[in-house]
Amino acid sequence: MAFVALLLPSVVQSQVDYDILKKATNKIFIKDVIIHDRPGSSIEYGSILIDDGIIQQIGKGIAEPKDALILKADSLHVYPAFIDALSHTGVKNKEENEKRPNVKFAGSPPNVVAGILPQLSVVDQLESDAKSISSLREAGFGLAHVAPDGRMLPGQSAIISTSGKALKDIVLKERVGLYSQLKSSPGVYPATMIGVISKFKELYRQAEGASVHIGKYKSSPLGMQRPNYDEAIIAMIPVTKKQQQVFYKAKSAKDVYRVLALQKELGFDLVLSDVQQVYPIVDAIKSSNAKVLISLDLPEKPEGMKDEENDKAEDEEKEDSEDKDKDKDEKEPEVEDDEETKKFKERKIAAYKNYVAQGSMLEEAGVPFSFSWIEAKPKDLQKNIQTLIENGMSEKTAISALTTNPAQLLGISNIAGTAEKGKLGNLMISTKAIFEKDAKIKFMLVDGELFEYEIKEKKKNSSSGEQMDIAGKYSYEISQFSANGELTIEKDGDEIKVLMSDEEDLSDTIEATNVSQDGSNLSFDLAVTEGGNTMDISVSIEFSEEDFEGTVVTQFGAAEIEGTKKSPKH
Amino acid sequence: MNSIKNIIFLSFLSFGLQAQDNGDVLIKNGTVITITDGVLENTDVLIRNGKIDKIGEDLSASDITTIDAEGKFVMPGIIDAHSHIALDVVNEATSPNTAHVWVGDGLDPYDVGVYRALAGGVTISHAMHGSANAIGGQCETIKHRYGVLDPEEMRMQDAPRTIKFALGENPMRVHGERNNIVPATRMGMEQIFRNAFEQGKAYMKANKDYASGKVNVPPLYNLQSEVMADILKGDIIIHCHSYRADEIYMLLRVLDDYGVKKICFQHVNEGFKVAPELAAYGAHASVFSDWWAYKFEVYYSTAYNATILAENGVVTSINSDSGELIRHLYHEAAKTQRYGGLSDNEALKLITLNPAIQLGIEDRVGSIEVGKEGDVVIFDNHPLSIYAIPQQTIVDGVVRFDIGEDIDDMRLDVDPEEAVPAFYELEEHNHESGDDKCMQDVFEFLNHKH
């Protein structure tokens, strides 16, 4: 064992208390690392000196300063920290169940009810100590371009750092772009997507008119009606003058076409945002010259799809455990699919293959893009990018999409995006080249702050571990079924009781059967009765700290479930 | 990368679907029902670059798709003047007047309903806003180019703009009953139209005053007023959901007061009572063949409606308003021969040239004439025969439906996360008393909604 330990990077074994050292100096010196200073380029065994969060020196042969914190990161890989091109990171959760004011005329609701708030700045909605900021940082990001959440026009975006410091310290740039969606407002205008588009057109034209009016009034107000003070219209003026980009969320190919048509009619500076379905429209995106942010929310791999590497591993495991595992023999024989089902499944697999090939399609078409996180989760970053790489996207493109491309798009490439002298010393330090299998982030440096992460050994067999304490009340969401509500887990000795309810009536609960816990995994079955029909649902979830996620399987197919522990106040 | 391209290719093109807009095809030796120039036996139709290039005997062209139509019937593509297929949104039901919205912003080229319509010989449909509002949204005339992915390519470019109006119970219920605002009565309905036209007039004047320098500030842009003004200017054809003769006549008087001429009444079940008045105004009528009594205001009707309207000189069409009926509009047209004794040509006009006139596209489609667009359907039997089945449907010279290559799964867009089988409702029918439940849910849903 001692021999093995010698081969490991020294940081893994010797824990230096960097917290104490940090207080003594603002300088950080990173020694003998592989520096991936920009996409497609690297410096073998170089060093970096950071002072007050700015890179002072970078390269080979830099003398070790005497007054710096020395980061022992020998042989580790250093990258410019990633830049999140668009997400809701750090944005306060809006009060759910907030009572909407009664609107007399659904056709002309107040802007706040309609979700038309282009004047709002996301900065007013930020929580600098939000968990979403630290999670993003843990996933390798130093900067985030964040937008408020809402309906058709939620407000103005900003660029923040993930240092977790006070609000005044984390905002790099305010009012970066206008965030826009095709999301309607139930019950009031615009209640549909076509309403949203018509309202956008109208506001845009109104802003153009207001701009003329304000200009004329400034030069000679005598005898002229003064311009109205309409916050929403005024906030749209920079967009009409192409002084501000519109980050328009468009998930599907259809939505992308709609937003492109809107852009063509009005002429604003468009960034297609959080696009999930790219494969049918690569050429359309290219010829539109629109900038594009691709969502890293990839579809789940369809069942029955061959995954060669994993299958091989599983087969080997199976062989090993065949003797021990008698349960497997008793498993029900698999029912052969009929021809129609087979064809449906083949088309699902073909569709999935299209989705995971999107990165390489854009790369081949020469369309630069960045990644956005509106619907994806930072912790899926590595897995999903690896999937895109396995399907033909180059690592260089992946790194560009996470560093130089967003920096350029957001107008901050003079201070971020690459690791070079004078730029922000926001760095990510990983155990291996970042998209290699099992690569882990060991350190993050953001705004001169050092964050160290424990490298957890991958658990081979979770059942041998301790049972995690998962008792409590959780809120859950199954977005595919538009279902959410409360999940209660009570523990009495070894007995686990699981109760599930729908948000419409939290007191109407269903008790789960076949509950079993295995480490941080929990599985149970539910029998849901609706309109005289009973549907069997089986749920398996995995907990990590306060959250859980997993799968719900019904007769209609599987769906993702996720949830968060409710604070005791509730 | 080759494999990826193959996948895209397979996903979209393996069914013979084509993304390009215009094609070439030669149809040989068919019985050509031209609509405007009689029936031509043993005649060829050559479509070049999406347009009908030649009609005659012994036509030849090299290197293009040739269809042998011997013993078959070739007629102009069927046109449906009232449909809601290929739409992601039908009703913006938030106001009695939503002239500012446009269903063209919500086209869904992936709707498999478009393919089903093609299988019924329909090449063009009028994708309409719903009837929740007195003045609904603007509609869109679409070409059934199933296989294109860009909603823009579904549009029939340069077709006149149209808008949905609605009379009677639907808008009264949605706004009057539900929200206790005007219109709660048929009197209120009239007032909505008059107010909206006044609004359009005032807006036009305000813009004129600004353009002429009379005022120095531009009026606040208002999309609804823009559209009302465009109707007043004659730039938009009104298609009005209607049933009762009294309210049909009411709208004629309102339109006359404002000088609006372009009007096609939809459904118009009591149209037979005011047929001479409709003809005198130049109003059109688009009706069901024999469908009524589905709500109180539609109890008084007749299967002779289309014939009476047509015989009185009203440009009349038969429409579907349904993803199912759209698959056999030729049967619907044939019913006018049983009820009213229309000639073959008169009956077929109801689903070809007449709806084209109602949509303002009769100079481009609706008949087989040299120079018109290559929208054609080939039937195995005479299209008014109960045995008629469309064999090929051609849009702009591109074969978009071919019964010989009609595979089961024609979807263009597949969700990799969808449940399989996707059509689990069918399983429900196997349950005991499953048939009842099927409808029960529908009624529960309806009761809940209203």
Image (tube, coloured by chain):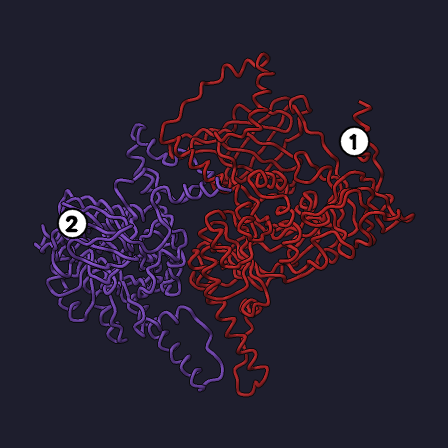
Query: Front-most of A341 and B304?
Result: A341
Q: Which mark is residue B29?
A: 2
Q: Chain of mark 1?
A: A
Q: Quadrant of residue A381?
A: top right
Query: Front-most of A565 and A281?
Result: A281
The residue pinned by badge 1 equals A8
From the viewer's perspective, is residue B168 above or below residue A454?
below
Question: Would residue A504 be visible to someone looking at this image?
Answer: no
Amino acid type shown at disc 2? Asn
Q: Which chain: purple?
A: B
Which residue, as the protein is rendered here, is positioned at the far top? Answer: A323
Tell me whether circle 1 and circle 2 mark residues in contact (CB < 8 Å). no
Q: Residues within 10 Å of mark 1 (few under 14, many from 20)?
A: few
Which residue, as the protein is rendered here, is positioned at the far right? Answer: A66
From the viewer's perspective, is residue B252 above or below residue B328?
below
SS at badge 2 = strand
Left or right of B419, for residue A294: right
Which tint is chain A?
red
Query: Front-most of B202 and B421?
Result: B421
Amino acid type shown at disc 1? Leu
User: Where does the C terminus of chain A fall, quadrant-wise?
Assistant: top right
From the viewer's perspective, is residue B425 above or below residue B400?
above
SS at badge 1 = loop
Q: CA distance from mark 1 to mark 2?
A: 82 Å
Q: Chain of mark 2?
A: B
The residue shown at (45%, 86%) is B213
The residue shown at (64%, 26%) is A519
Question: Would residue B360 be visible to someone looking at this image?
Answer: yes
In percent of width and height, residue B78 lies at 22, 54
User: Where does the N terminus of chain A fall, quadrant-wise?
Assistant: top right
Query: Front-most of A316 and A206?
Result: A316
